[in-house]
Amino acid sequence: MSLRLFEIAGADPEFRPSPYCWRIRMALAHKGLTFEAVPWRAVEKVRIADSGGRTVPVLVDGARWIRESWDIACHLDQRFPDAPPLFQGEGDRVKARLIDHWTTNVLHPLMFRILVSDMVPLLAEKDQSYYQKRTYRYFGRTVDALAGEAEVASESLPDLLSPVSRTLSEAAYLGGAQPGYGDYILFGAFQWARVASGRQLIEPNSALGPWFEKLLDAFDGAGRQQPPRAHWH
């Protein structure tokens, strides 16, 4: 078995901020699978051309290239059925897909507005202009302009996260007694904030705090091994 995971990296190749790549890092750890982590920059499209796409994560499993975090997670459960499952049946898979769509389409755009100005200086120089252009294309404003709006954007985050926090006040994980792929989807968003920004996006009394700390420590501290932003600044 040979697994390689292409991940967005920063000026320091060990800096890994992508929330989507963290979903898969945690999924691989959950299943007890070893892999080679391959640093990749956003302008290096040719390096992942065999995946049929232009973004990471990309998992290379032998001769097969799989892109998109959701497709990779489904592949891992199908490919390694004897390892701990990411989805506890079809119902759990559908609920995780709901978390996937909500996190990607609702939570991430708000978090991008909050985090992008902190993250861009930590990226490789050849990627910084890419993110500047991408930010303007999606938001109609520059990275510097979004930096001025970050505090206002942060104020709307607690209300957005309230249903998740309430759920985690009633259960240990979104997967129930044990974490599952739905947890890793949301974990990726907060790991992105932890490593790319000094901003505290989890309210002190929120149930998200203990949940996030438990996941940072899971799998021999796979998440905590990536230093917070202060290390890279």
Image (spheres, helix red, strand yellow):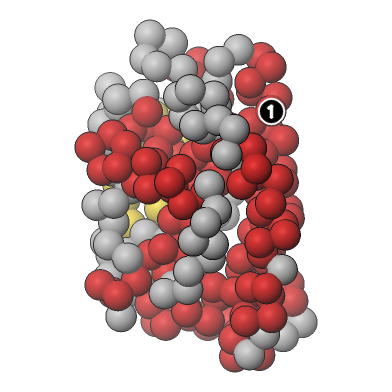
Number of dots carrying numbers = 1
- Graded by Cα atoms within 10 Å as few (under 14), some (14 to 19) or many (20 or more), the crowding at tag 1 reads some
| In the image, farthest residue toward the right | 140
Could you tell whether 131 is left or right of 104 in the image? left
**Residue tagged by mark 1?**
95
**Residue nearest the viewer, comparing 11 with 184:** 184
Q: Residue 81: image x %, image y %?
A: 43, 11
- Residue occupying image coordinates x 57% and y 39%: 169
What quarter of the picture does the C terminus occupy?
bottom left
**Residue nearest the viewer, comparing 210 with 40:** 210
- 118 relative to 210, above or below: below
| In the image, farthest residue toward the front | 205
- Residue occupying image coordinates x 34% and y 71%: 229
- 10 relative to 66, above or below: below
Q: Secondary structure at mark 1?
A: helix
Name the kind of residue labelled 1 in the image.
Lys
Residue 80: tell me if it is visible: no
Residue 115: tell me if it is visible: yes
Could you tell whether 219 is left or right of 42 in the image? left
**Residue nearest the viewer, comparing 69 with 178:** 178
Q: Residue 51: image x %, image y %?
A: 52, 42
